[in-house]
Amino acid sequence: MVRFLLRRAILAAMVTLTVLVVAFALTRLSGDLAVSIAGPNATAEDVATIRKNYGLDRPLPMQFLEWAANAASGDFGRSYLYRAPVAGLIKDRLPITIGLGLSGLTIALLTAIPLGILSAMREGSLLDRAIGLIALIGQAMPSFWLGLVLIIGFGLKLQWLPISGVDTWDGYILPGIVLAFSAIPALLRLTRAGMIEALASDYIRTARAKGLSTASVVLKHALRNASMPVVSVAAVQLGFMLGGSIVIETVFALHGVGYLAWESISKNDFPVVQAVVLLLAMIYVGLTLIADMMNAVLDPRLRAG
Amino acid sequence: MTARSISTGLGLFIVGAIVLIALGAGLLAPHDPFTQDLMYRMVPPRWMDGGTSLHLLGTDQLGRDYLSRLIYGARISLLIGSLTVVTSGLIGTTLGITGGYFGGRIDDAVMFAITCRLAIPLILVALTVVALVGSSLTVVVLTLGLLLWERFAVVARTTTMQVRNLDYIAAARAAGASTAHILIKEILPNILTHLIVVATLEMALAILLEAALSFLGLGVPPPLPSWGLMIAEGKDYMFFSPWVIMVPGIALFVLVFGINLLGDGLRDLLGVSQRR
């Protein structure tokens, strides 16, 4: 058990380190950063000044080591655009993005698990097919477009929900629904497959034979076994959702980390971009690590691996 | 006719129709997709009040014929979708087969690469690259191609592991075939069906991502009629004329839906079972 977790933790650290290098290389190798910062109307002298002021004239490995060392102590440099420390900018906006991710995940689980159970209980029926169609529709839905359609429908025509900002809690509903759409297909299929397998197993037959009610058999016995993979995939999906928040936050004008990233990318504010790439990668790595741990706790067979 | 074959047929019909429309865009489009006519801006579709049979789906904010832009937009989606899949398929399959066949340290390295790729936030990195290199069709294809290979790698690796110890591989080895020959001529054809199924799913994903990038202003550059870009350009007018975002949005949805139906159908038809 300890060895398994240790190996996973070392792997996670190595992945984070690699992403650190990629995040750095990304902004340095694909163009001259100084020219990008200076903008299209800058003279050669402007560019030279910027290169010197931002320390871009030093060798790349030196720049990388300095940035990595600072990042390790929580200092991600200063934003060119906001003229403020990047760490503070991200800290201010992180609650919105996390709130968005969690509302998306909650909506996704509340939709996918009941539908998956229903689908499994009536395997092959018309209901099962209809639910399968929902998964396919969710998979094909362009999230940014769905966001706009919901804004027109619920925000403007019906005026039920706020269409931008999160000044009140219900501001999370529409973006949460859009975000949930991307996770529902995977979670739904997994719940369905897990439940079908569980419902066909011997202990369910025993439970039924004992005369337990269908509700008790399905919810207490089968769901408990089917939920293990769902829980670990849900953690990974949350990571993807936080990564996808960049599109949703732009559509709904939510000033979270995703919006900050989009703004920084379009304005060449690269210290911020690097930090957000690193942050999202670390959250993803952390969530997969948690998922691995949960699997190890729930399924003793994995601990040997 | 089972429900499955109906849905596969529907997928085939949708994808086939859109491919034909894209190929015959020059013949089918009633107008030039780039010609502006500032006298006829934001004309609604034919069936709405103020619509004209001159512009069946209306015109956009610059007076360009919406139907013609939609038709030429199909080319962009399909082109980016298929070129991305070719790029990412080459990368992923090479890595997957190599890791799966050789195993050991090489496989560890491939698995590590896959794990790292999954940790990299997709849209964020794609946006950054396009912003730095400059937006063009080629840049979008290369960026997405370099980012979307992991599912090819995972599937190629697992399936290669399943076939590498079969007798026919041992026979080829005994007959003195080179490793390259075994990988390309013996293993690749046997895992191809699995890869084709992955390719459909990845193509759908690539088309959605291109639209999202273009929507955020860092994908295909204007005035190209990318569906994502059309939605972005229509966004400012959507409160008064919702059809400007409905038309390209529905087209995008239908294409991706069709590709997914086709992919699911192929998976059943080719007898491929895989975890999603």
Image (cartoon, coloured by chain):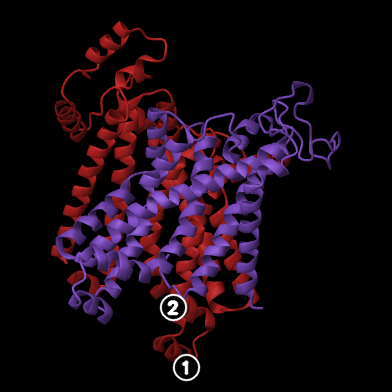
Check the picture and name the quadrant holding the C terminus of chain A.
Answer: bottom left
* Residue with the mark numbered 2: A222
x then y, percent, for residue A98:
41, 43
Camera-side mark, 1 or 2: 2
x then y, percent, for residue A102:
44, 49
Asked if residue A54 is positioned above or below residue A192 in the image, the reply reads above
**Disc 2: which chain?**
A
Q: Drawn colour of chain B?
A: purple
At x 86%, y 36%, the residue is B49
x then y, percent, for residue B84:
44, 48
In this rendering, position of residue A182 left or right of residue A24: right
Provide the letter of the chain coloured red: A
Q: Secondary structure at mark 1?
A: helix
Q: Residues within 10 Å of mark 2 (few under 14, many from 20)?
A: many
Q: Secondary structure at mark 2?
A: helix
Check the picture and name the quadrant holding the N terminus of chain A.
Answer: bottom left
* Residue with the mark numbered 1: A209
Which amino acid, mark 2? Answer: Ala
Residue A155 figure quarter: top right
Which amino acid, mark 1? Answer: Ala
At x 79%, y 40%, the residue is B56
